[in-house]
C-alpha cells in the first residue's frame, strides 16, 4: 500500500511542477490560442452540426504544448448535449493512464454524484459575472477530474481536468467563456 501512496504524491508533485514550469515559460499564461483550437478542430464541426447546445471550447489548457499534445475524442453529441474526452494518448476511452480532462455542454444540469455521495463543491466567480461551481478532484490510487460548471443563456457547461486545481480550472473556464464572447 505504501508504494501507491508514494506514487500518488509524486504524481501530484509532477503535475504541479509541470504547471508552474509551463506558466513561467509562456508569457501569456497559456499556450498559443491557435494551438489550443487545433485540439478541437476535427470534432468541432460534428458537434455544431449535431447539437443545439452552443459550443464552448477553452483556449487555455495547462501542460499542453507541441511536446505534450492533447487529443479531443468526441464521446457523444446529440440535440441536447455534447461530451468531449481530452486525452494525452490515443486511443483512449477515459482510462486513468490516458485521461487529461473533459469538456461538456448540455441543456440540463450535470450530476456529479459519485458512489451515491455528493462531492464537495464551492461557488466561484468567473468572467462576465458568471457564478460557477468548483468540484475538487479526489486522489487515492489515482486522481479523478476536478470540475468547474456554470450555466449561461439556459445551457450548462462543465470542464474537467484530472487532478486539476481551482486556479487551473478557473483559467480554463474563463478562456472558454471569453472565446465565446
Image (spheres, helix red, strand yellow):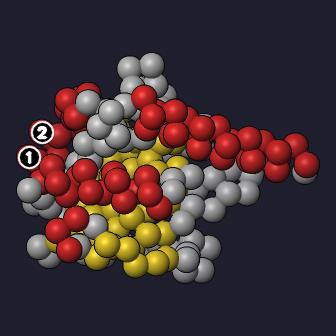
Q: Farthest residue to the top: give it.
A: 67
Quadrant where the C terminus is found in the figure: bottom left
Residue beneath the point at 82% across and 45% down: 6
**Residue 109 rendering spot, x and y as whole percentages:** 30, 76
Mark 1 surroundings: few (<14), some (14-19) or many (≥20) residues within 10 A: few
Residue 86: which quarter of the image? top left
Residue 71 numbered tag: none
**Element marked by disc 1:** helix
Name the residue at 87% across, 43% down: 3
- Rendered view: 40 above or below 143: above
Q: Position of residue 165 (x, y in %)?
A: 51, 57
Using the image, determine if residue 52 lies above or below residue 61: below
Q: Residues within 10 Å of mark 2 (few under 14, many from 20)?
A: few
Which residue is pictured at 26% across the width and 57% down the height? 174
Q: Can see residue 75?
A: no
115, above or below 24, in the image: below
The reply, left or right, for residue 97 in relation to residue 128 is right
Q: x, y (%) of residue 84?
A: 33, 47
Query: Residue 144, can we see it?
Result: yes
Give the camera-side residue of 147 and 19.
19
Which mark is on residue 49? 1
Task: Give 59 or 89, whichever is nearer the viewer.
Answer: 59
- Residue 76 at x, y percent in the picture: 29, 50
Q: Residue at x 12, y 58 (%)?
A: 54
**How many numbered marks, from 0 up?**
2
Question: Which element carries disc 2, helix, strand or loop?
Answer: helix
Circles 2 and 1: CB atoms closer than 8 Å: yes
Mark drawn on residue 45: 2
Spatial CA distance of label 2 from label 1 is 6 Å
Query: In front: 19, or 34?
Result: 19
* Residue 16 shown left or right of residue 55 in the figure: right
Amino acid at each position: 500500500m505504501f508504494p501507491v501512496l508514494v506514487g500518488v504524491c509524486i504524481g501530484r508533485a509532477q503535475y504541479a511542477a509541470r504547471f508552474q514550469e509551463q506558466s513561467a515559460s509562456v508569457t501569456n499564461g497559456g499556450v498559443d490560442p491557435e494551438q489550443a483550437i487545433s485540439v478541437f478542430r476535427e470534432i468541432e464541426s460534428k458537434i455544431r452540426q449535431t447539437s443545439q447546445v452552443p459550443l464552448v471550447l477553452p483556449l487555455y489548457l495547462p501542460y499542453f504544448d507541441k511536446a505534450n499534445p492533447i487529443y479531443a475524442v468526441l464521446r457523444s453529441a446529440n440535440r441536447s448535449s455534447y461530451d468531449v474526452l481530452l486525452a494525452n494518448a490515443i486511443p483512449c476511452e477515459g482510462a486513468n493512464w490516458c485521461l487529461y480532462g473533459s469538456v461538456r455542454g448540455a441543456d440540463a444540469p450535470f450530476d456529479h454524484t459519485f458512489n451515491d455521495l455528493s462531492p464537495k463543491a464551492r461557488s466561484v466567480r468567473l468572467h462576465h459575472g458568471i457564478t460557477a461551481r468548483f468540484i475538487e478532484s479526489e486522489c487515492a490510487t489515482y486522481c479523478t477530474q476536478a470540475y468547474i460548471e456554470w450555466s449561461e443563456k439556459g445551457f450548462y457547461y462543465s470542464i474537467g481536468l484530472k487532478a486539476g486545481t481551482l486556479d487551473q480550472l478557473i483559467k480554463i473556464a474563463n478562456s472558454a467563456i471569453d472565446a465565446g464572447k
